[in-house]
């Protein structure tokens, strides 16, 4: 059985070093037109693969000793009225860089950058969870993503 605290610590580090790192992250463009980000530490490997830019969808998988132990699926988009979605994604990356260790799914419960407010509402724990993250500017929701995941391959 995977140690939940070690997995949570690893996820925080992996996510901060991949998408949340912005342009500093090494991205691989795959032949199927998806993008892959990976992170390794000890016996752990993190693999994030997504399609699109706007909207986008993907999945994260954590391997421990080369066996899949965790995964999360996500899908998000910026409201069509927004012409500069780069600014929205800048807020998202800022929020994701503050991922909490006790619930390392996406960003913190709330993050404010200028007039933009990121909120993350979820239920569950690392072994089984679901949530929704949003970004609002004033009263207008400009971004929304849903996600869910947990442990995989626990029973043989």
Image: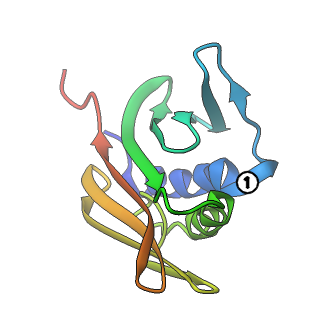
User: Position of 39 compared to 120: left or right?
Assistant: right
Vertical placement of residue 78 versus 63, above or below: below
**Quadrant where the image shows the N terminus:** top left
- The residue lying furthest to the right in this view is 24
Residue 126 in the image, given as x and y percentages of width and height: 32, 54
Q: Is residue 49 visible?
A: no
**What element does badge 1 sit on?**
helix
Q: Say which quarter of the image contains residue 29.
A: top right
User: Position of 135 compared to 92: left or right?
Assistant: left
Residue 69 in the image, given as x and y percentages of width and height: 37, 34
Q: Is the image coloured rainbow, by chain, by secondary structure, or in one colour?
A: rainbow
- The residue lying furthest to the top in this view is 31
Say which residue appears at 68% left-offset and 59% top-offset.
Answer: 86
Say which residue appears at 64% left-offset and 86% top-offset.
Answer: 114
User: Position of 84 compared to 109: left or right?
Assistant: right
**Quadrant where the image shows the C terminus:** top left
User: Position of 95 compared to 130: left or right?
Assistant: right
Tag 1 residue: 22
Vertical placement of residue 66 versus 63, above or below: above
Q: Is residue 69 visible?
A: yes
Residue 15 in the image, given as x and y percentages of width and height: 59, 52
Residue 63 in the image, given as x and y percentages of width and height: 48, 31
Vertical placement of residue 130 versus 120, above or below: above
């Amino acid at each position: 059985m995977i140690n939940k605290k070690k997995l949570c610590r690893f996820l925080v580090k992996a996510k901060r070093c991949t998408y949340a790192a912005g342009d500093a992250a090494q991205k691989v463009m795959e032949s199927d037109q998806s993008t892959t980000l990976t992170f390794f530490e000890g016996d752990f490997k993190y693999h994030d693969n997504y399609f699109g830019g706007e909207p986008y969808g993907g999945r994260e998988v954590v391997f421990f000793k080369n066996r899949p132990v965790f995964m999360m699926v996500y899908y998000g988009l910026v409201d069509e009225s927004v012409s500069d979605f780069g600014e929205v994604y800048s807020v998202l990356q800022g929020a994701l860089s503050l991922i909490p260790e006790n619930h390392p799914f996406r960003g913190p419960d709330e993050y404010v950058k200028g007039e933009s407010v990121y909120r993350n509402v979820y239920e569950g724990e690392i072994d089984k969870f679901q949530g929704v993250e949003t970004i609002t500017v004033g009263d207008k929701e400009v971004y929304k993503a849903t996600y869910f995941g947990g442990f995989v391959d626990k029973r043989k």
